[in-house]
Image (tube, rainbow, N blue to C red):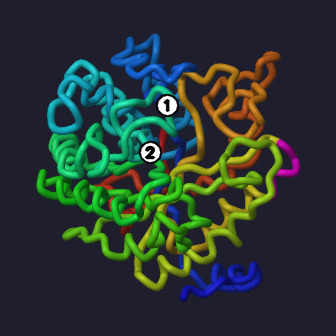
């Protein structure tokens, strides 16, 4: 059984670690927009109109993040149902117009700006009905559901996407956003199919593998009836012939770990202790690709705590804060009880016209934890790479 550390023990462990954050940045959320239906009408917003219903990035905002904030990592969300239309199903047949829009965003981040980019299918390990994500859609690989895409189809999708980006060393393959409410061994099977498809394509870049239960770090070593085993017990069996796969973790700091509420109540260092011990025991690395807190004074030490924890523990090689994106407007991606306080997008404003969460959260708290030196060259890797200062 994994040890459960006290906060003091975690601090002692952190002090002994030789830790480096190689990749630091922000999640870009807007590519998954435009498919929500209040009546759960399947097919709503599909394929959607690029630039009206959804978008991937705003290039000017990316410029600010790289040139001013000196970050080197973006996580760009997209919908599987737009990349692989329902008419052809999940697999290796893409909507080429949609792919070109996505590839343009990836290329701008990686080739124009020189940063790294996580490809993020924002589908909760589901396909065919994003009308009320995260709860709608058939679980990929669920053999008891005749409408579900198969694990093999998921592997074929990843093989095709990886083939198209295998020569871009700054791409990172994020297998899936937040699997939940499914058998954990099926998460493992789908992850393995993705890894196998990616490596069969010839791609050598880093892969990020999620666990079950919304990818929560606090629940990674736990199991529940109907969803056994734990993510820890399942993912330890994941095989990558290149040993270039890290664990994808999400960890919010509000009362129920959802990233919905204004009040913070969940300390990252304590809640991540068990998964950190598991990573250390299995000589694995992780990225926390979603975390966040509100702009309240009460939340600031919680946000600082998780950022310092990642910086102090060698198991964590990178992070992306949730979230920026061109379509948020005054709405908040995180932690406001539906109040309109803006997002992490540069230039974000509240509903009343005041500074949004880019100013009140990113610049006030997150920015000071962006390392002065990050990795700017070389293939994405769990081992990081040469550190350097970003020049404008």
Q: Which residue is depicted at the point 81% across and 21% down?
A: 354
Q: Secondary structure at mark 2?
A: loop
Say whether residue 7 is visible. Answer: yes
Residue 225 part of the magenta-drawn span: no
Measure the alpha-carbon separation of dots 1 and 2.
26 Å
Drawn side of residue 325 relative to residue 273, left or right: left
For the point 45% across and 61% down, which residue is it? 211
Q: Which residue is mark 1?
A: 62
Residue 297 covered by magenta stretch: yes
Question: In this view of the protein, which residue sits in the foreground, 105 or 292?
Answer: 292
Please tell me which residue lies in front, 321 or 71. Answer: 321
Q: Quadrant of residue 357?
A: top right
Provide the residue designation for mark 2: 124
Q: Secondary structure at mark 1?
A: helix
Q: Quadrant of the N terminus?
A: bottom right
Say above or below: 14 vs 64: below
- Between label 1 and label 2, give the one nearer the viewer: 2
Q: Which residues are magenta?
A: 296-301
């Amino acid at each position: 059984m994994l040890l459960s550390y006290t906060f003091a023990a975690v601090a002692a462990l952190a002090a002994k670690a030789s830790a480096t954050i190689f990749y630091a940045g922000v999640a870009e959320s807007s590519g998954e927009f435009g498919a929500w239906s209040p009546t759960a009408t399947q097919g709503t917003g599909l394929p959607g109109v690029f630039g009206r219903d959804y978008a991937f990035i705003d290039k000017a905002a990316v410029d600010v993040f790289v040139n001013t904030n000196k970050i080197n990592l973006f996580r760009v969300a997209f919908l599987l149902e737009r990349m692989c239309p329902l008419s052809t199903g999940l697999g290796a047949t893409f909507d080429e117009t949609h792919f070109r829009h996505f590839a343009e965003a990836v290329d701008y981040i990686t080739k124009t700006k020189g940063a790294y980019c996580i490809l993020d299918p924002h589908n909760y390990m589901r396909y065919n009905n994003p009308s009320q994500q995260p709860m709608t859609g058939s679980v990929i690989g669920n053999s008891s559901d005749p409408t579900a895409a198969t694990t093999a189809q998921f592997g074929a999708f990843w093989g095709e996407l990886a083939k198209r980006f295998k020569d871009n060393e700054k791409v990172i393959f994020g297998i899936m956003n937040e699997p939940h409410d499914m058998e954990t061994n099926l998460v493992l099977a789908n992850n393995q199919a993705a890894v196998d498809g990616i490596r069969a394509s010839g791609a050598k870049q880093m892969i990020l593998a999620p666990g079950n239960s919304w990818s929560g770090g606090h629940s990674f070593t736990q199991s529940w009836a109907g969803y056994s085993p734990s993510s820890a017990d399942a993912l330890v069996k994941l095989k990558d012939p290149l040993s270039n796969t890290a664990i994808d973790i999400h960890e919010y700091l509000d009362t129920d770990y959802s990233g919905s509420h204004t009040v913070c109540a969940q300390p990252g260092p304590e809640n991540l202790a068990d998964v950190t011990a598991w990573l250390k025991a299995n000589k694995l690395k992780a990225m926390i690709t979603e975390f966040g807190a509100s702009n309240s004074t009460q939340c600031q030490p919680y946000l600082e705590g998780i950022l310092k924890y990642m910086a102090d523990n060698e198991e964590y090689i990178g992070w992306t804060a949730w979230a920026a994106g061109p379509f948020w407007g005054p709405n908040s991606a995180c932690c406001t009880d539906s109040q309109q306080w803006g997002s992490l997008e540069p230039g974000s404003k509240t509903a009343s016209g005041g500074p949004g969460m880019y100013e009140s959260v990113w610049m006030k708290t997150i920015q000071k934890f962006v390392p002065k030196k990050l990795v700017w060259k070389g293939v994405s890797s769990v081992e990081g790479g040469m550190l350097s200062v970003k020049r404008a």
